[in-house]
Amino acid sequence: MTFVFMTLFFLYSMRAMHHSRGLSIVETIVTVAAATVVLIGLISFVLSLYRTNIYAVEQSFAINSARRGIERMVRDMREATYSDEGAFPIIFASPYEFYFYSDVDRDDNVERVRFYIENGLLKRAQTKAVGIPPTYPGNADTTSLVSDHVRNVVNTIPMFRYYDTAGNEVSNLSHVTDIAFVVVHMIVDINPYRLPNDFVLQSSASLRNLSEN
């Protein structure tokens, strides 16, 4: 309403100035001031609209990126299997990290894969076995970004929850041989101080290559 009022006032002032034979100094100052107020209001409105649209686009990109990332993550987890060295499929499991072996590229060679959160970034590290007999080097061959603006650690909400074959949650994560099912719960928000609130993505993976323990 304020913006509409200022606009109407500006138009009325311009019309009055057009039909007037002359303007006093006071009238000129008032007219210029009115025009300045309207201009400032218009600029503020445009900037606000621009910032809102930019934020919406950035949030949309972040959510889409997270959705693609969680789909790949779940796909890799489903292919968890024994390593080329014969090691058990799961190396390490925690609320914010999952470390396992999986044939992620379907080439019959098993890779070592790690998903973890670092400074609000969900990352994926992959290592291929080398040599005969095959061994896994200490460093990852490739490390890539799965999703940014991840809020799980800050909000103290686990990203990974683990369940056994009976559907019971595994509370002692040192017993990785009990894990048969993983639920992924990812929270994304590019700016926690602005609406909309956190966006939640959830998926799950059955480690189908594991036999019952």
Image (cartoon, helix red, strand yellow):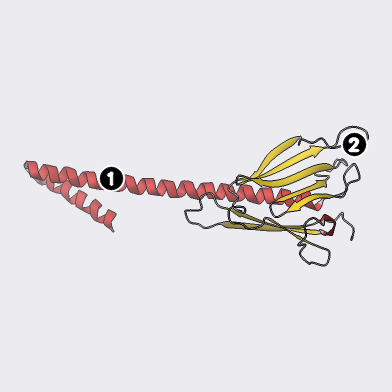
Direction from residue 142 to residue 191 in the image, left or right: left
Q: Quadrant of the N terminus?
A: bottom left
**Quarter assignment of residue 209:** bottom right
Which residue is at a point 81% across and 63% down the rendered structure image?
164
- Asked if residue 53 shows in the view, the reply is yes
Residue 212 vertical position relative to residue 31 in the rendered view, above or below: below
Q: Which residue is mark 2?
A: 134
Q: CA distance from mark 1 to mark 2?
A: 69 Å
x and y percent of residue 44 in the render? 33, 47
Foreground residue among 56 and 194: 194
| Residue in the foreground of this view, choosing between 73 and 143 | 143
Res 40 label: 1
User: In the rendered structure, which amino acid carries the disc numbered 1?
Assistant: Ile
Q: Position of residue 74 (x, y in %)?
A: 74, 52
Total numbered labels: 2
Q: Residue at x 24, y 52 (%)?
A: 6
44 sits to left or right of 65: left
In percent of width and height, residue 127 lies at 79, 38
The answer to whether any part of residue 23 appears in the image is no
**Secondary structure type for disc 2:** loop
In percent of the image, x 51 and y 47: which residue is there? Answer: 57
Q: Residue furthest top?
A: 131
Q: Position of residue 27 (x, y in %)?
A: 10, 45
Up-down relation of residue 25 to residue 208 (above or below): above
Position of the C terminus by quadrant? bottom right
**Amino acid type, callout 2:** Pro
Dot 1 alpha-carbon crowd within 10 angstroms: few under 14, some 14 to 19, many 20 or more: few
